Amino acid sequence: MELRRPLYLTSTMVVLGILCAHTLGANTAITVDVDRGTDNAYVVTAAFDVNVATTTAWEVLTDYEGIGRFVSSIRRSAIKEREPGRVLLEQHGVGRAWIISVPMHVVLDVREYDQRALTFRDVCGKSFSTYEGAWELSTVAGGTRVIYRLKADPSGRRPAMLAKSAIRGSVKQLLDEVRAEMLTRGAR
């Protein structure tokens, strides 16, 4: 026996879906994929959609010296040099895997592109033999898509399963905190 919804109910659901798509579609779940590259570095691709303008998202991503206020793993972040489209940024932080805390130190050569993307690369090599990546922003219905890419090879190898799981958790927390700050600033 086939059950049929009344036509008015089906039409109402379709209309509500269209009206709510703009509002509800912007705050999607954070996706995080972590793989090992051919050079054994960890390769991370993560993304989320957030219901704010790209200008707000950019403001958060480029709040270099204020990042410690909203990203719990950053203890200190200081601009060493600045020129148009480029920042040399020193950061001290802590990486966590369950009950283990590992201090981290990077000096990032950050390049900014049209308030839509920034790339970064560690130039000091103290905590990572490779640490480079990017943040990319694009406009989507209802807000902004944020894509985070990272290639990292921690100095002093960790067991692959522990490191992969720890990296996934750290990136998820980072993106949760960044998105929360974007939403806070977008509500102002």
Image (cartoon, rainbow, N blue to C red):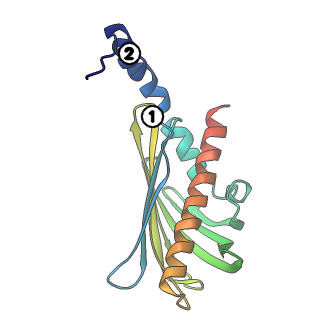
Given residues 147 and 21, the one toward you in this image is 21
Residue 144 tag number: none
Q: CA distance from mark 1 to mark 2?
A: 15 Å
Is 123 located above or below residue 23 in the figure? below
**Placement of 188 over or under 64, stated as above or below:** above
Q: Tell whether 50 sits left or right of 4.
A: right
- In front: 85, or 121? 121
x, y percent for residue 102: 67, 80
Q: Residue at x 74, y 55 (%)?
A: 69
Q: Is residue 71 above or below residue 41?
A: above
Looking at the rendered image, the quarter that the C terminus falls into is top right
Secondary structure at numbered mark 1? loop
Q: Residue at x 65, y 46 (%)?
A: 181
Q: Identify the disc placed on residue 15.
A: 2
Q: Please, what is the three-letter code of the amino acid marked with disc 2?
A: Val
- Residues at discs 1 and 2 in contact (Cβ within 8 Å): no
Can you give x and y, in whole percent of width and height, for residue 187 in the image? 65, 32
Q: Which type of secondary structure does the marked residue at label 2 adopt?
A: helix
Judging depth in this view, the residue of 125 and 143 nearest the camera is 143
The quadrant the N terminus occupies is top left
Q: Position of residue 153 (x, y in %)?
A: 48, 82
Instruction: Check the image and name the residue furthest to the front.
Output: 1
Residue 125 occupies quadrant:
bottom right
Q: Amino acid at mark 1?
A: Gly
For label 1, the residue is 25
The residue shown at (40%, 23%) is: 17
